[in-house]
Structures are given as structure tokens and as C-alpha cells.
Image (tube, grey):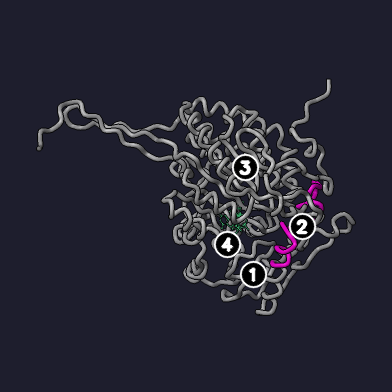
Amino acid sequence: MAQKPLLSLPEFQNVSTGTLVVKEPLNFWGGARVKPKDTKNSEPVYEPATGRVLCDMIPCGEEEVDAAIKSAHSAYLKWSKLSGMERARIMLEAARIIRERRDEIARAEVANNGKSITEAQVDIDVSWQTIEYYAGIAPTLSGQHIQLPGGSFAYTRREPLGVCVGIGAWNYPFQIACWKSAPAMACGNAIVFKPSPMTPVTAVILAEIYKEAGVPDGLFNVVQGGAETGGLLCHHPMVAKVSFTGSVPTGKKVMEMAAKGVKQVTLELGGKSPLIIFKDCELENAIKGALMANFLTQGEVCCNGTRVFVQREIMPQFLEAVVKRTKAIAVGDPLCEGTRMGALISKPHMEKVLGFIKQAKEQGAKVLCGGEQFVPSDPKLKDGYFVSPCVLDNCRDDMTCVKEEIFGPVMSVLPFDTEEEVLQRANNTTFGLASGVFTRDIARAHRVAENLQAGTCYINNYNVGPVEVPFGGYKMSGFGRENGQVTIEYYSQLKTVVVEMGDVEDYF
Ligand SMILES: NC(=O)c1ccc[n+]([C@@H]2O[C@H](COP(=O)([O-])OP(=O)(O)OC[C@H]3O[C@@H](n4cnc5c(N)ncnc54)[C@H](O)[C@@H]3O)[C@@H](O)[C@H]2O)c1
Ligand SMILES: C[N+](C)(C)CCCC=O
């Protein structure tokens, strides 16, 4: 008997670099893929490793956004009436299907995003774990009972918000869709998700998996598009909440639009996070940590520790080892198992990153390695957007490469002398997404963690992100949280019910 393909679309079978062409519609609502009405504003989507066109992204207009939101609302009416156990059962089935299809989803993600296959597999694992985790929480959602005088009482109910919109960035396309949909669905909400126009491919796979697992038609919807479609979603009167992942400037616009309808917002924005390495650290771990903090997903990670402060006494050893390890990073075909760094998301983004490096040199930084466009020897990769990972020395706090988010494989190294000084410099930024410290001194580690103004502080590691752990920003890196139990509060509201057991007071 012929084996059923794991993913429903034949184009996703046996994807290798340079082969995927997506022709099927990438929108999904009412439980089915939907062809866009008007194709005139379509944009090509590129495969980062080859520069080849992968598919067209056709943005949804007003009518289509409205249809997706209405379909979400009707599914919400059914889904929100299920018990937590019933919701959990379906979500666990979705997690199981993702786990089973992990490698195929990861390959499609690589074709669209350019990251290495080993990283994409981890992203897909994190995705099903997220759904599993929130499935586990769904049956535990409960209220409080409050005793009042005379036998009266009050109780609270944790209720869903309604239709939630998720707007995603391009660096973790499938994972972001799961980070938003899993807690939302656990709480009884419906979701309309808009991926980044640069990575439209894998969200619709998630939609099909949710459907196969048994979620009601319309509960998880995908609308494709850019700023205009995003604006339509944020303004729609039937939307209760917007959860946004992206840059600070766009986050501000989303907040403004949501404010007009007094909608709740979660903002997961950018960063320029400090990583502080004290001379008493375990140096080998600190070096590995600095690489983890800078070079995952070609450096296109919001929480990357791109300002690496190294205590002056150990700077020579640190630089020698970090440069040696950086030069050894295998850059190339992201679908090869041995590759550790793939291609940047787009040609303009690659040029922007190279521009930051050029400016850093003009401002006095010294390139110790990398920082150039890289052309792999494989001819099919000659038009890919590869940049060799870069370590910058002689950096100062006032340089652009130290102040602005580059979102590419560029580590800026800065010397420091004292704890007090480095804390002041580390906090001297408008961002506050993450931070890290390497030291063997346990008291210092916790003191530094307390004093760093950031939503996460990693002690003796970096960029570890299990779903059980809340993630989100301080300052202009945003607010609200994803992951962890606390995220339930961002996808639900509390109703108080007050019950009188006696007579109403005769006051008037
Ligand atoms: N904190 C986090 O969890 C996190 C995670 C990933 C990425 N990021 C940040 O995302 C940025 C990179 O992603 P990007 O380039 O896709 O960001 P972006 O702000 O350009 O776009 C993000 C999303 O917003 C949409 N959008 C653009 N204009 C809009 C508008 N006017 N109204 C509504 N939606 C609009 C885009 O189409 C896209 O889906 C970096 O700054 C990075 O740090 C943050
Ligand atoms: C690297 N983490 C921890 C998986 C976070 C990714 C989310 C930000 O871009």
C-alpha cells in the first residue's frame, strides 16, 4: 500500500536546497486554504540560500481579512465552550502530528528562512513542546472563591478574550505562530495569524495540522500580507487582542492602532543585549556562550547578546579563542547536516548588515574575522545571501554597531574594568530584551542579574529558551510575555461574579 505523504502538499515532499516551489494558496480560514482574490500586489518570496523565487506572497485585502476574522469569531463561540480537558486533547494531537512531521516542516522552514536544518529542527521541537505545554495548562485554568459576610460569596472565572491577532517576524516563522496560538487556544480564544511577508510558507502547514487534530474550522487562520494587511487586522472591531513580534518602530504603530480600539497588546520587539564576561568565569563556557549569543540563525535573533563586555585582564585569551571558533563556523547549504550557519533572510537585509560592518570600520572598529559576503563553492548557492560571521574589536559604546540592532552575525567586543562600570554601560540603552553574565562568583551572578534592566538574564549560558520559561522585554523591547504560565494572563480576562445569599439592603 502506498504510504500517505506526511504533509498534504506534494511540493513539501523531499525538499532540498533549490527545489521547493510553492504554488498552492498560503491563506487559510474557515478550515481551508483560500485563494487570494486579487493578485495584483503579489510580491516574490525568495529562498535565501539560492536567491531563487520560492513563491508569491499575495497580500489579503479588507474583504479577506474580514472573512478570516468572522470565521475566527464563529469558531471561538464553539471552542470557548469546551472544557479545558477537551481543548487539551485536541492540542495534544496537534503536538503529536508536528512531532511526527518535524523533519519535513523543518526543511520547508529552512527553504524559506535560510537557517541551518539543525536549528530549524530545534525550532519545530520547541513548537510542539509549546502546544503540549499549554495543552497541559488548559485544564488547570480556574478561578477563586471568596467568602463574603452573611453566607454571600464571590467567585472569579478566567475567560478568553475572543479573536486574537498574531503578527509574526521572519526569524522563527513556525515557532512564533505556535508561541502565539498555543496559549491563545488553551485559554479558549481563536487566532488570526499574519506571518511576515518574507516567510509566508509554514504557517499554513500549522493551520492544516490544527485542522487534522480536530480544532473547529476557523479557530486558527492565516492571512498573508505586509503592513497594510497588518493594519487591517489591528483596526478590525471584532479583534480583542494583538500579539506582535517585530521591530520597535512597527511595534509602536501596532500599539497606536490597538489603542484606538482599546485592544490588549503584547509587544515582543528588538534588542541590543549585553553579555558580560568576568575574569573569574569558566572561559571555555564563556566563549561557547558568546557564540550562542551571536551566531544562531545567522545572528537574526531578537535576544542576541551582541554587546559582549569582557573584563580587560582576559581580553587577549577571549579574543584569540572566540575568533578561532568563529572562523571555524561552517557556513553554507542550510540543508546540509554539517552546516552551522545558513543564509540571511534577504538581499537587502544582507546589504544592510554589510553596511553596519562598513560603518563600524569607519568609526574605528577592527574586524578580527568575517564580515564579508560569502559565496559558497556549490554553484547553486552563488546567489545566496551568506555573510561570514564577524567579530569586531576596538569597539566603543558610542559606535553605531554597539548602539543599534544589526540582526546579523556581528559580535561587538568591548573591554571593561569594574562591575559597577559595566552595569552602567550595559543598561545604557533604550532596549531591554535580554542579558547575560559569565562568572564563577555566585553572589556576583545574582547581583548582576538583579541590576541588569532586561526581561531575561542568562547566568553562565545564553539563548536557552524552554517553553516553561517566560520570555519578553523591558523598556522599548516591549511588554507582555510569551511562554511560561504567566502568558495565560495575556490571553484571558478575569470575570468576578458576586452572589447575594440574603436580601438586598434597604438603603433608598
Ligand atoms: N522579542 C521577540 O520575541 C522578537 C522575536 C523575533 C523578532 N523580533 C524583532 O523583529 C525584528 C525583525 O523582524 P521584522 O523585520 O519582520 O520586523 P518588522 O517590524 O518589520 O515586521 C514584523 C511584522 O509586522 C508586520 N508589519 C509591518 N508594518 C506593519 C504595520 N504598519 N501594521 C501591522 N503590521 C505591520 C510585518 O509584515 C511583519 O509581519 C527585529 O527587530 C527583532 O528583534 C523580536
Ligand atoms: C533564541 N530563543 C531563545 C529561542 C529565542 C528566539 C526568539 C527571538 O527571536
Q: In which quarter of the image is the N terminus?
A: top right
Whether 400 is among the magenta residues is no
Where residue 144 appears, as percent x and y from the top left, is: 33, 33
Of circles 1 and 3, the one toward us is: 3
Q: Mark 4 points at which residue?
A: 275
**3D distance between C-alphas at marks 4 and 1:** 14 Å
Ligand 1: quadrant of the figure: bottom right
Amino acid at circle 3: Val
> What percent of the width, then of the height, locates residue 173?
65, 47
Tell me the residue at 71%/49% (across/down): 39
Observer-side mark, 1 or 2, equals 2
Instruction: Please name the amino acid that badge 1 sits on.
Output: Met
Q: Find numbered disc 1 in the image and state the secondary structure of the residue it sits on.
A: helix
Q: How far apart are marks 1 and 2 (CA)?
A: 21 Å
Q: Which of marks 1 and 3 is nearer the N terminus?
A: 3
Q: Can residue 422 be seen in this view?
A: no
Q: Nearer the viewer, mark 3 or mark 2?
A: 3
Residue under numbered circle 1: 315
Q: Name the residue under label 2.
A: 329
For label 2, the crowd category at 10 Å Cα-Cα, with few meaning under 14, some 14 to 19 and many 20 or more, is some
| Residue at x-position 59% and y-position 31% | 217
Q: Mark 3 points at which residue?
A: 222
Q: Specify the quadrant of the image occupied by residue 393.
A: bottom right
